[in-house]
Amino acid sequence: MHAPGCNAILCRYGELALKGMNRGRFEARLGENLRRLLRGIAGVEARRVQGRMWLAKRDGVAFTPGELDLAAEVLPRAFGLTSFSPGWMVPPRLDEIRAAVAAATPSALAPLCAAHAPDVPVRVRVRTSRAWKQFPLDSLAMNVALAETVFALPGAERLTVDLENAELTVGCEIREEFAFVHFASLPGPGGLPVGSHPPVLALLSGGIDSPVAALLAMKRGCPVDFITFHSAPYTPPETVAKMEQLVTVLNRYQAPRRLFVCNLAPLQVRIRDACAERFRTVLYRRMMLRIATQVACRQRHAALLTGDSIGQVASQTIVNLDTINAATWMLVLRPLLGMDKSEIIALARRFGTYELSCLPGVDSCTVFMPSSPATGARRQFVE
Ligand code: ATP
Ligand code: MG
């Protein structure tokens, strides 16, 4: 982000998200999460003003370019934010606002001017929102006043006003406490701040699906701990190393939480030797759920979570899911149930887990894999 002198970041969150939730709790959680994500910026504070959150340094000084880059990198991971705008916070007076617009607009315009042929004008507009009704000019008059400021800048002959289809919008918010000038609204990830709901335990494999499922639970406000099953010595030690790496990536979206690692091999050997071959996968998965339930009870998780999607693989037919599910009394969240693989992959790319998931790894489910696994393993037989 190149925004010299920028001294504040306006953070927006969906009003709808607050329905039925305690607003104060939501905002406090969001503020806490933002401070944690931005702890690399010394003295940064998150302040609340009328349904918005403002990030600024304690002494009001401008962010450095490095600090702005850090904010642009981490804020898209702050669940609960719908969008954010870096900008200039000034006292709510016309002269101060005009000065901020005059100082900041040239660097916002520079890349647009550079990308245009000299005879093609850059389309600009001004948009004011005036939450403080005592401010002497109304929003329309402010739009005109700030447009005059912009068109008085050197090089303004290259600009044209376009209210419908602007390439640069000069945004201005006027509040009793301060005014705010900005040029861009960058997308946040949406959802609810992590911590708005109780923690859950995700069954994490090295595949593409379960990391995405875990992130979707975080997106709805649940902190997520992880449990993974390996089958040493039948799976290599790298299996666990890959899971640790995945959890490091997932923990960038929340205050870091734990990975539980469990060796399923002894149980798999018993299942291999004692049970019908075609039920193996379903039996492994039932064991995983049983063990996860024990861990979740001790760690006070409110639910389990898996990356199941209906019919994606043999173990995920409705009949098999029912039989697997019967191994636990706990709520099992399955946020990917209705998604196609291509949709899950798109999310994995967006969340940044795709590359790691694609690294080769052996899943413990594939150990002693039957040649034709049952797709309709009925509960009464399996039990
Ligand atoms: P994924 O891409 O998440 O590995 P998948 O499409 O390979 O899923 P399955 O192998 O049937 O599907 O696994 C379904 C779900 O069971 C996974 O999403 C995960 O939640 C859980 N699971 C499977 N294997 C393991 C494992 N080794 N450790 C922990 N959980 C697992
Ligand atoms: Mg898998």
Image (cartoon, rainbow, N blue to C red):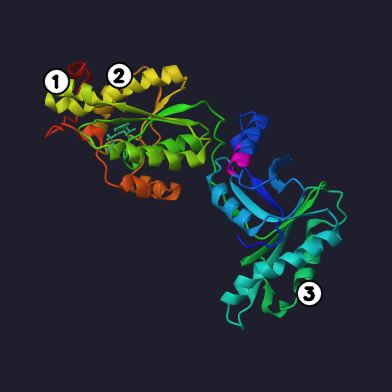
Secondary structure at numbered mark 2: loop
Q: Which residue occupies 64% across, 48% down?
A: 41
Query: Which quarter of the rendering shows the N terminus?
Result: bottom right
Q: Which residues are magenta?
A: 33-37
Q: Which residue occupies 72% across, 40% down?
A: 48
* Dot 1 amino acid type: Cys
- Identify the residue under disc 3: 152
Q: Per the image, is 73 magenta?
A: no
* Dot 2 amino acid type: Ala
Mark 3 surroundings: few (<14), some (14-19) or many (≥20) residues within 10 A? few
Q: Is residue 123 above or below residue 157?
A: above
Tell me if label 1 and label 3 are in contact, CB under 8 Å: no
Mark 1 surroundings: few (<14), some (14-19) or many (≥20) residues within 10 A? few
Q: Is residue 259 above or below residue 151?
A: above
Main secondary structure along the magenta-highlighted residues: helix
Q: Is residue 23 above or below residue 127?
A: above
Give the alpha-carbon distance from disc 1 to disc 3, as whole Å.
82 Å
Secondary structure at numbered mark 3: loop
- Identify the residue under disc 1: 275
Labels 1 and 2: the sequence-earlier one: 1
Q: Which mark is residue 327?
A: 2
Judge left or right: residue 308 versus residue 372: right
Q: Nearer the viewer, mark 1 or mark 2?
A: 1
Frontmost residue, 176 versus 130: 176
